[in-house]
Amino acid sequence: MDFNQQVIDEFRANAGRVGGPFEGGRLILLTTTGARSGTRHTNPLGYLPDGDRILVIGSAGGAPRHPDWFHNLVADPVVQVEDGVFTYDAKATVLDGPERDEMWARAVESDPGWAEYQAKTTRQIPVVALTQIAGGPPNASSWGAALKLVHDAFRRELATIRREVAASGSSLGAQLKVNCLTACQGLRLHHTAEGGGMFLMLRDRFPDLAPTLDRLDQEHESIAALLTGLQQTLDRNDVTTLRADVDRLIGELEAHLAYEEEQLIPFLDA
């Protein structure tokens, strides 16, 4: 419990970044309601991207019993998720049948450690999908800080994907493909929200920003083309091209994010 609290404190103090054994990994804080006590309990958990939802796995290190958080969400499936940028309510669904087996196979393929945990216990390790049902703005003190927070989350995720692609060898794993597609979807949604919301507000309040916003809109189109190319590479299961595509996307996106932050954060915080 002391170790968990240290991880929780570090996570919250560093916008989702945690060192030690979790360095560079995907981590959330999951808060459930105690099935018997009604008390709220928070646990740091690794997760797998899965499009509009995320997956968590009740391995408990291969212990003979399911973890307490799993029993809690079975009793009350409305949980809270913290991902370092947003805090949101989610509905937990325990997967079963072919869907559970498919998600489990993806997890094991991406990290054989899951199979090692399963080998330690006779229980079937559960796979749980968490789907957002309500949420709010980023956990930031200002709109400028919120923009930087969201950007840094994309930076971390793409850096993780770059490492996964580099380690993938000659084959493209199913979970790695989902990771890439989920990141692409997130970037498209973010840029759509910027163009249709934040940029419109800034154009209205700060007319002199028009040339900057025009450039950012053009960069959005360029990045959208890279995302389309990356998705086509994924459809072909072309690992060699994927490495180059990911590097190209990260390079162009990093330049775009840095320029956007430099130009817009002062106005967002004005």
Image (cartoon, helix red, strand yellow):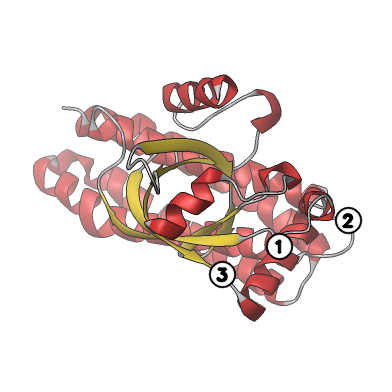
| Rendered location of residue 221, percent (x, y) | 44, 62
Q: Which residue is located at x 72 percent, y 48 percent? A: 64
Disc 3 is placed on an element classified as loop
Residue 267 % position (x, y): 21, 32
Mark 3, mark 2: which one is toward the viewer?
3
Between the residue at mark 2 and the residue at mark 1, the CA separation in whole angstroms equals 30 Å
Q: Is residue 226 visible?
A: no
Q: Is residue 265 left or right of residue 184?
A: left
**Among all residues in the image, which is located at the extreme right?**
170
Residue closest to the far bottom: 98
148 versus 245 height, above or below: above
In the picture shown, does residue 46 fall above or below 125? above
Looking at the rendering, in which quadrant would you find the C terminus? top left
Q: Residue at x 84, y 54 (%)?
A: 119
Local SS, label 1: loop
Residue 245 seen from this side: yes
**What amino acid is labelled 2 in the image?**
Gly
Identity of the residue furthest to the front in this view: 36
Q: Residue at x 23, y 30 (%)?
A: 142
Mark 3 = which residue? 95
Location of residue 52 in the rendering, given as x and y in whole percent from the top left corner? 45, 64
- CA gap between label 1 and label 3 equals 12 Å
Q: Which mark is residue 5?
A: none
Label 3 vs 2, first from the N-terminus: 3
Residue that numbered label 1 is attached to: 124
- The answer to which image quadrant residue 206 occupies is top left
Ranked by sequence position, the earlier of labels 2 and 1 is 1
The residue where tag 2 is placed is 169
Of badges 2 and 1, the one in the foreground is 1
